[in-house]
Each structure stands twice: as C-alpha cells, then as structure tokens.
Image (cartoon, rainbow, N blue to C red):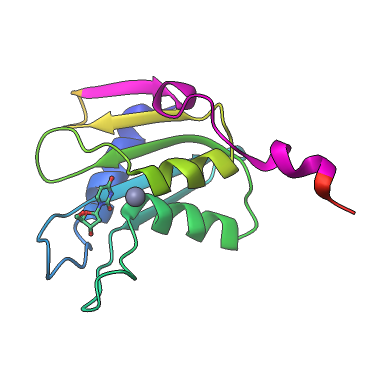
Amino acid sequence: MDKKELIKKAFEAKENAYVPYSNFHVGAAVLMEDGSIYTGCNIESASYTPTNCAERTAIFKAVSEGKRKIKAIAIVGDSGYTYPCGVCRQVIREFNSDAIVIIAKSEDEYKEYTFKELLPYSFGPEDLENTRK
Ligand SMILES: O=c1ccn([C@H]2C[C@H](O)[C@@H](CO)O2)c(=O)[nH]1
Ligand SMILES: [Zn+2]
C-alpha cells in the first residue's frame, strides 16, 4: 500500500471542503480491498446537523459504487492530527473492523492505527447475524 499516495489524495480532497461555519477543512482518502481509492471532504449545512464528515463522504462514495471492504483510510485536517469522530468510527466499523487508519499531518508525518485501537469492543454487523429471518 502506498501510504504517501493515500495521504496526498486526502490533502487534495481537503481543498474541496465546504466549511462556511467551522472553517475547519478535513479530507479523507479510502483505499478499498480491490485497490480503488475514493476521496471525500467535509460538507457543512446552515442547519448544522446534516453536516457530513470527510471520512463518511469518502466511504459513502465507495459504497455507492459497489465497494464493500475498506483496507485503509487516510485523514487530514487543518492543523495537527485530526482523528475520526465517533460516528465515522462506527461507519468504518461497518466496512471492516480490521482496517488501517492513517492520521496525517503531512505525507511524511503520520500516525497509523489498527481500527480496533480506535474503537475497541465495538458493535457491528456480526452482532445482528442471528436476528435475521
Ligand atoms: O474527523 C473529523 C472531524 C471533524 N470533521 C468535520 C465536521 C465539521 O465539518 C468540522 C468541525 O467539526 O470538521 C470531519 O470531517 N472529520
Ligand atoms: Zn466524523
């Protein structure tokens, strides 16, 4: 996996962030199991709650193109390290509890986590397996 390339794409996506309220720009790039990469930025709303994080924008683009398994996701923000919010962690969980999460300050300065380090003891699709009819 080319981590630098993934981080670079996350920085490019950050340029498109629509953030008139927070002015906090975030970009994400998600590498799917088949090698495809989807990018996303955060998108805010005047009514605030519809705001979508960069991570979910990227993941939803991938899923809506038929992709189902995340290999890795790179996340970049305006300053320092930007960690995914709880909602985004749960969405990553849906599409692979063993994904690699890269939090980057630059292409050369990044931290890498296993998903389970960021969301241990999680609830996910397997928990509902026996409830299906
Ligand atoms: O990991 C994060 C953290 C925050 N945001 C966005 C949501 C909102 O637009 C702004 C401030 O919370 O940053 C993301 O996109 N991803
Ligand atoms: Zn989020």
> Residue 14 location in percent, x, y?
22, 53
The image quadrant that residue 64 belongs to is bottom right
Query: Is residue 52 in the magenta section?
Result: no
Q: Nearer the viewer, residue 8 or 91?
A: 91
Q: Nearer the viewer, residue 61 or 81?
A: 81
Residue visible at 49% across and 60% down? 61
> Residue 128 location in percent, x, y?
74, 44
Which residues are drawn in magenta?
110-130
> Residue 133 location in percent, x, y?
90, 54
Above-or-below relation of 130 to 104: below
The image quadrant that residue 94 belongs to is top right
Above-or-below relation of 132 to 5: below
Residue visible at 34% across and 36% down? 5
Side of 100 where 127 appears, left or right = right
> Residue 60 location in percent, x, y?
50, 58
The image quadrant that residue 4 belongs to is top left
Residue visible at 50% across and 47% down? 91
Side of 83 where 129 appears, left or right = right
How many numbered discs?
0
Side of 111 where 79 appears, left or right = left
Q: Nearer the viewer, residue 6 or 93?
A: 93
Query: Is residue 113 in the magenta section?
Result: yes
Residue visible at 64% across and 47% down? 68
Name of the residue lying farthest toward the bottom? 46
Above-or-below relation of 33 to 15: above
Name of the residue lying farthest toward the right? 133
